[in-house]
Each structure stands twice: as C-alpha cells, then as structure tokens.
Amino acid sequence: MPFVLNHYSDPNHDGSTVPKYFAANVLPCGGVRILAKKTNAIETVARDYADRLVLQKLTELYEVVKPSEIAEQLTSHGLSLGVIRALLASNPERFAYSERRWVPAARIASEGRPVAELVYSMAYRFGAPIPVTLVSIELSRTTDLDEEVAEYTVRSHAQSDPRLILTLDDHIVAADSVFTGSDESIERAYLINNVDEEAVAEVQKALGDFDWRQEDAIVKAVEKAAPVNIKALGAAAWLALNPQVPTSHHLYDWKKFNAELLSIPGFIPSVDGNLYPESETKSWITTAGKIADKLDAVIEIEDATPLELKKDDIEECVKLILKSDEAITATWLLENKFEVTPNVKTYPDDLTNMMNALKEDKRVEWVGGDRFMKPDSAPEIAKEVPLPFQFEQTPHKQEDGEPVDAELTDEGLSSSLRKLIAHPLATDVLDEEIAPAPKTMPESLRLVLKPIHRELGTFPLSQFPTGWFDPEPALQEVILQDADGKELQVWVNHEARLIFNLFDWWLDQPVESGSVFQLTKTSKPNVLEFQWLEQSDPVVYISNQRIEELREIASASEGKSTFELLCEVMAHWPKGADFLTVLWELNVVRRTSRRMLASILSSYVCFYQRSGSPVWHYDHKKVEQGFDKSKKKFIKKD
C-alpha cells in the first residue's frame, strides 16, 4: 500500500537533530542499554525478552507481594520462580520494590508527571509494542480517569505524539526503534536515525529487486529478509518510496509503515533493533534462564531467618520424590514449596538444611549435587565396568618361554613413551593412574571421544581432572544440556571410573574416533553445558574408512598375538604414525593397554623412531629379528 508523506526530523523533541543516544554510542530500549559493539548480544536479547514477559504480567496484576504470582502466569513460557525473582531483582529500570510489593518501575518514575509522559514512559521502558488496553488500565490505576476515558487518552496520545506509534494490532511502541525518515537527504536521515549504510545495503541485497508498491509489500519483505534490522528495513523502503528527486511524490509515511511492520503476526521485535521469527523466542527463554542463574542479585525483603523444616515438611518432600520418575532437586523443593530461591538471603542455610534432612531419610537416594530419586533408580548397566573394557593376556610364547606380548617396566620403555603413556588421551578405564587434584580447577574441559566408548555409550573419567566431579556419592546423576535446550541424563560412576548412558548423543556424531566436545559447569549442581566442537583431535582421529579396515583386521584376529596385529596396523603407515594414533587404531582391533603397546614398540626390532621425530615406523624386513634381547631384563613379572 502507498504511504502518505509525513515529515519527522526531531527525535529528541528539543530542537536537536541528532539523537542523544547516538552521541553516546548506545542504543536505549526498555531500560536496557546496549553498547553498539557489545559481544553478548544474544544474551542481551534473551534477557530483554524475558523481562518484557515479566513486566507485562506484573502490569496486568498491578502489583505483587510474592513473585510466585507472576510465575504461575508464565509457567507455560518456561520461566521458573527462581528466574523471575532474579530478573525482578536485577533490573531497576523496569521493576521496582515499593512498600513490600513489586510494581512496574515506570509507575514510580512517572508519579506526578503529565499523562503524556506516563504513556510514553510505559512504552519506552517496555521496549516493544505494548497493548493499548494494558497501558489504559495502568493509566486508570494511577490517575483519576476511568478505563474508557483512559483508553481514549492513550489512543489520542499514540496518534499525536511523534514519540509514539499506534500499531494496526492495537499496541503502542516508542518511535526510537524505527526509521523516521521523510524528505531529508540520505546522509541526514541516516544520521538522525542512527542507521548504518552497510546494514541498509545488506537488507537491499536480501530483498533483491523488490517492489515496495505491491500489495502486502511489508509482510513479504519481512518474510524474505527476517531476521532483519527494523531501522535498516525502514530505510530501504524509504529509499525506494521517497527518491532523492525534488519533484518526486513521497510515499513513505513512517508512522503508517511501522504501524504495519510491528503488527505482522509471527515476528517479534527485539532490543537489538531486529525483527525475529517468533520461533526464536524458545531459545531466548533458555538463555535467559542461564543468565538468571548467574546473577548475583540478592533480595533482602525482610530480616528473614533460615527455614525451620518440620517433620511434615520433610514428609511432603519425600512423597514428591517418591512419586516422580525423575530426580527432584532440593533447589526445586525450596522454590516450589517455600518460595525460597538462590536470590533469597537465607538460601545457603535453607539449602543445607534441606539437603541434610533428605540425606538422612533412607526412603530416598541422594544421586549427587542437590538431586534426589527413588532408591536404585540408576540403570544396572551403570553399576559396573562393561566386559569389552577388560584386557586379556595372549597365550603366545617366544622360544625362551617369555610372552610374545610382554609388558616392560619403565626402564625398558623408549624415553619418549615413558612420558606419552601418562598423557590423558593415552589413559582409559582400567588403564590409568589417578593424579592429584589440580590447584586451579577449570570450568570447561575439552574432551575427545574414542571408538570403544562411542560403541558402548560411555566416557572415561581418566580425561577429567581429579575432583572435577564431586567425589560423593559414588554413583551420580548428571544432566547434560546442549545449545538447543536438549537434555541427556547420564550417570557418573566413580568406582567404575566411567560415565554411562551417552548412547543417544554419541550415535548422532558421524566421526567414530577423535570427535571433540566441551563440557562446562553451570551454576546448577550436576548440570553441565555440552557442545560439540567443530574439530577432530589430530592424533585420535580415525576416518570411517580406516575404521572399517581395522574391523576387518579384528575379524581375523583370533589366534594372533598383539604383536602380529600391531604389524598389520602399522603396515598402513609407511611414513610413520604417532603413538596415540597407533594406540587407538590397535584398540579397534583388540583391547590393548597403553603400556602393552609401548612395550611392544620398545622391544621389537622392526619398530623404531628416527632421530628427532615423534612418530613410530615399521620395517617388515626386520620382523624375523624378533624381540630385542637387551630388553629381556625389563619384562615385568607377575
């Protein structure tokens, strides 16, 4: 539809032509100030969206004494009581605590100010289109106007105030977030609206040869370009509809354009100035929850004392745990039964009291962190080391009766291998020495998946620093969360030195050996962030084609010594191979310990290293020379 010319070039309404926020290099919206080059833009978007949901419900309720009143309204959106408490306590630009009640901050800030300022303040602090009815109800509550008169007043201001827009779906929004060009020069219009020329060019490129005069042009443009910068999209339309020719007819009316733009169903405006598909909001809620978990805001509403848990309280908590097929956390029990969240001053003492009471009750089982389940909930497969991890001594003997596959003491090993066998990637379950805990514990770990663990749905604790997982209890439930919000329940068994139940996520990974992933601790006990990294470990990686070749060797391995199998594996590497590469290739063929491989490489003449080279070579012509007699004295005795 065409747009009627409507001049607007004074966004500050104070005679200036440059927006105040442009000079400060920040974009103001809804009380959240974003640096133009902020690195955590996704978190800012997520936090702002969650704040808007809370603010809308708080405004509808007028005021709340308990944040649980808001939580009940937002359960379907995925915002818990703990998250809502944290959001309320950490954004004074939107939320205020007054007279022991939570209220919208705009209400406090606008006390005694003209009606026009109250309406604008609500729209500005909300930071997105807000229903006219909601603004009207708030206006009627804070003035002497009845609701009908208040609604008429809001609509009048939205239509006449150049700082506001009334959308087609009956919302109002502050005009700061849209492109307000009219008959200015391109340079001046971009300056006034703080629009980047490159951003406009990107929108034009995304739209291609686009006809802004066609029916439903705005809807079609958004569907084609989203997510799209709102101002840049407006600028692109303005350039096409308001040509820089004195005699041209200007069709871009910024109020009408944005009234339609911000009313399109299925798209959500965000604090970063972009219009996103509504489907994005699910991940925003997940991210907002993670942000809230990290907030340090503490709510000191009153001089509260720690909870005194009575027998009936514990009985009710135990019943909830026994009824559930999944673990229930002490944090969840405190939040949902007592409205105590991590932001409450007494939370540490309350959590300790709850944990101690539940640990003492033998009807439930502590499964690590703050998690409790029915007794014996862990799967049987997670309670012992699977048989494929066992090592077997081959029966083959040399002429003098010594084993063909003999382990050597450290003194008999090649000097380079003495160090390499202690490398975390060389160790594995039943083949490790537990090191002391490091002085500084890392929050994130880079870990490498090996083929046998991919097949069995496990992972060895040998790749973790001692103490990274809490030492008690011996068998623990841990929840992994990926970036898409998917969760996987796994079991950490300290006695078996394995993590179990990883089948589902391991089989999604096409690389069978050498895939790299990262685990990061969160603020929640026994909840870890999981991320596949776009790389493979260079020494543990085995191509899928090579894996099949190794499996063929394995299928014909019966009756052969490990030495013979190693010769077959090494024949693939005419230019030599790293010890770790050989170790995990050999383990596809036969389960072999790191010391056994190091011993065979060190004691048979056909295996050697060149001076200064880290790789091992195989000379098939020297196989008949057999075992290096100088190594006999280093053979380990049972």
Image: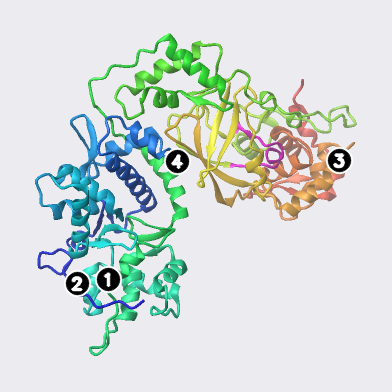
Local crowd at mark 3 within 10 Å, few (<14), some, or many (≥20)?
some
Q: Position of residue 231 (x, y in %)?
A: 31, 67
Q: Are marks 1 and 2 in contact (CB under 8 Å)?
A: yes
Residue position for label 2 = 8
Residue position for label 4 = 76
Q: Is residue 572 visible?
A: yes
Among numbered discs 1 and 3, the one appearing first in the sequence: 1
- State which region is magenta: 448-462
Q: Nearer the viewer, mark 3 or mark 2?
A: 2
Q: Amino acid at mark 1?
A: Trp
Residue 461 lies within the magenta run: yes
Local crowd at mark 4 within 10 Å, few (<14), some, or many (≥20)?
few
Among numbered discs 1 and 4, the one appearing first in the sequence: 4
- Marks 2 and 4 sit apart, C-alpha to C-alpha, by 41 Å
Residue 16 marker: none
All told, the count of numbered labels is 4
- Marks 1 and 3 sit apart, C-alpha to C-alpha, by 77 Å
- Marks 3 and 4 sit apart, C-alpha to C-alpha, by 57 Å
Q: Secondary structure at mark 4?
A: helix
- Marks 1 and 4 sit apart, C-alpha to C-alpha, by 36 Å
Residue position for label 3 = 557
Q: Position of residue 129 (x, y in %)?
A: 31, 56
Classify residue 89 by image quadrant. Answer: top left
Up/down of 303 relative to 254, above or below? above
Left or right for 405, reference 64 = right
Residue 254 marker: 1
Among numbered discs 1 and 2, the one appearing first in the sequence: 2
Classify residue 297 by image quadrant. Answer: top left
- Marks 3 and 2 sit apart, C-alpha to C-alpha, by 83 Å
